[in-house]
Image (cartoon, rainbow, N blue to C red):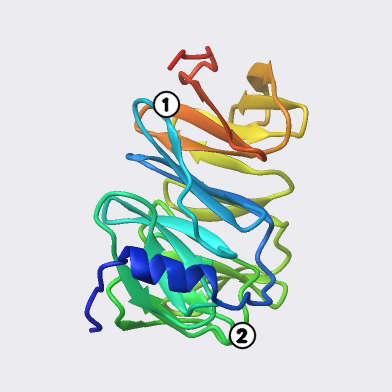
Amino acid sequence: MRRLLPLSLCTLSLLACAPTATTRAPSFDAAFSEDGATWVDGGRACVARAPSYRALCPALPSVVAVAWNGGDAWAAVPGAGLLVTLDRAARSVTAGRVVALSNTRAYREDGSAVTFAGAAATGVAGTPTAVATGGDGQDYALLAGTLRRVEDGVIVDRAPRPALRVTPTGVTTADTPGVVTGAGTYRLTGTALERVDATGRVLASVPHGPGRVGLVGTEVVTVSPGGTVRVFDVNLTPLSR
């Protein structure tokens, strides 16, 4: 296990001069946990913790992915070969050229993986297009036109759609971003945020542009490109913050 190093002001200065990495990571993505939302937008990473959801966007170069682990919001900076925390205690982990993050580990360009403590972890055979940790605690990866469970390599979908959706029992795929919960599926269509039941019947809908949606405790939280954070209850009634 590699030692976690404090990310000092000197280190941040060095990071700002690090070369950028060429990856297949999306220009905008977000991750959610009980603690809040974190997102990357055009290489800039931000975190907004509940309940205030005030955004903090530290100066880091060319972030390609973000995730939550151990109550911390993490960002991958492949040009410097590091994982770094975005707020709270400053920490960094040597990880190499990372292209994707789940809640449990970082995946490099060759598919090998490392934990947020710097230990080697089970990876995949090739560059993952996207990864996510399911409600079952297992990692799933879009890889070579399939959706695979990482730990044992089992193919769970041979014709996956482009967006990963976390479910209480794992991960599924869809054409639009969303999250599956016991209260229904919350999805962003590009023009609306919808809550639908298991049959696809729309139970509630509010106007909303493109973005990402997830759960933060009992709240439904969305992040849009540009960093707008919106908070709703389970019935999609907006909550002021």
Residue 136 location (% of width, % of height): 37, 56
- The answer to whether residue 162 is seen in the rendering is yes
Return the residue at label 1.
219
Position of residue 153 measured from the top left corner of the image (x, y, whole percent) = 50, 79
- Please tell me which of labels 2 and 1 falls first in the chain: 2
SS at badge 1: strand
Work out whether 238 lies above or below 39.
above
Q: Is residue 131 visible?
A: no
Label 2: which secondary element: loop
The disc placed on residue 126 is 2
**Type of amino acid at the residue the image marks with label 2:** Gly
- Toward the right, the furthest residue is 191
Q: How far, Cα to Cα, is label 2 from label 1?
A: 36 Å
Closer to the camera in the image, 27 or 110: 27
Residue at 47% across / 80% down in the picture? 81
As drawn, 145 above or below 182: below
Residue at 52%, 67% (x, y): give it: 16
216 relative to 176 in the view: left or right: left
Residue 6 sits in quarter? bottom left
Identity of the amino acid at label 1?
A: Glu
Who's the residue at 34% across and 32% down the image? 217
Residue 56 occupies which quadrant of the picture?
top left
